[in-house]
Image (spheres, grey):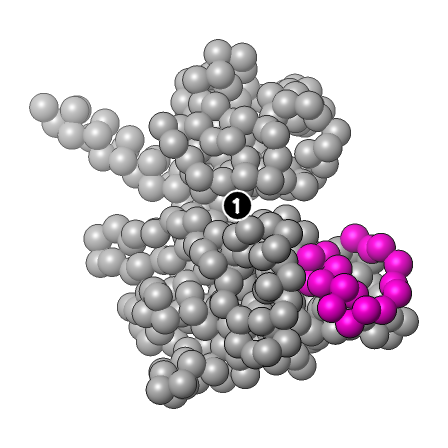
Amino acid sequence: MSQGLRVLVLGDIGATNVRFALLSNGVLGPIKWFTVAEFPRFTDAVNAFLDRHCRQVSVCEALLAVAGPVDNNRCVLTNSEWTIDAPELCAIFSFAKVHILNDFEATALSLPLLTAADLYPVGGGEAVLGAPMALLGPGTGLGVACFVPCSQSSIVVASEGGHATMPATSDSEDAIIDYLRRELSHVSAERVVSGSGLENLYRAVIAIDGIEAPKRNAAEITNAALDGTCPTARAALDLFCAMLGTFAGNVALMFGARGGVFIAGGIAPRLTEYIARSEFRARFEHKGRFRKYLASIPSSIIVQPAATFMGLRSIAEREDKTISLDRTHAERH
């Protein structure tokens, strides 16, 4: 191994799946998938990746995007029992450095790097150059972030916006929210716009309409909706898409995201055509006096599976430039 080779583990850690890849001197290797349920602890998953795919290299650092709030380089995942702690990882795996950040913060950094082939447009509008770009995405949870372009160094506003209270926009949604509120106390956007949220919508429709339907998980609800075998599943998925549109429009307004709104996560890329035919875009624009404002903002689904890793690589490249500048400055003095 050459002396100058810098090898990092990049990780995208959700509550259902964890993905790893090696970054060797700026070159991103193949992305490897693991299931969170396979491992009692996050360190077990790291060990499995290193043992199976990194025997021929010496890994010096880790750069990890995690599905939850990060505090002091540590995160307890919102929808999993895993704890990801930088000092622990350094001690166990002899990493020189571990950097932990929110997963949607990392994905937001990929937005200016995405091409037309990486995106599935939903609705019209034209992006304003240099304007903020909003990112949200339903998966196991619901992530939210904003990318703000700057001339020197762009800024990402990470957030826990998915836990903001979900509004209802009709009498039927009032009934849905009321049903879930009695069960959950607080109905956040994540409680309806996520995998578990789709299951909540399905159960609520069954209860409110007083019908009989089999218990289903999110994947089963989606499949039954798509193949037309269950009207209740179709109703739940339609509600999901509509509420996603409402929330996406809210996020666009909050961030002034005239640079575009981008939908990531594990669900939307599998439902591109369905979402495009749904009420998503109509609900996105349904903001009263600000309808024209929303109509001018483009919305797209990210279909590039490596988007988060593109964002992580940009962080590593930025760190490399900083190290190089510091080294040059030291040599001159």
Q: What residue lies at 45% left-to-right and 23% top-to-bottom?
A: 86
Q: Please state if 132 lies on the left or on the right of 297 as rendered.
A: left
User: Does 68 lie within the magenta span?
Assistant: no
Instruction: Residue 321 in the image: state x and y as whole percent.
Output: 30, 38
Q: What residue lies at 35% left-to-right and 66% top-to-bottom?
A: 254
User: Which quarter of the picture shows residue 239?
Assistant: bottom right
Instruction: Residue 88 in the image: state x and y as whole percent.
Output: 49, 16
Q: Which residues are magenta?
A: 199-217
Q: Is residue 10 visible?
A: no
Query: Quick one: which residue is furthest to the front in this view?
Result: 182
Q: Please state if 204 lies on the left or on the right of 292 as rendered.
A: right
Residue marked by disc 1: 309
User: Which quarter of the picture shows residue 333?
Assistant: top left
Q: Nearer the viewer, residue 137 or 288?
A: 288
Q: What residue lies at 61% left-to-right and 30% top-to-bottom?
A: 81
Q: Please state if 191 lies on the left or on the right of 328 as rendered.
A: right
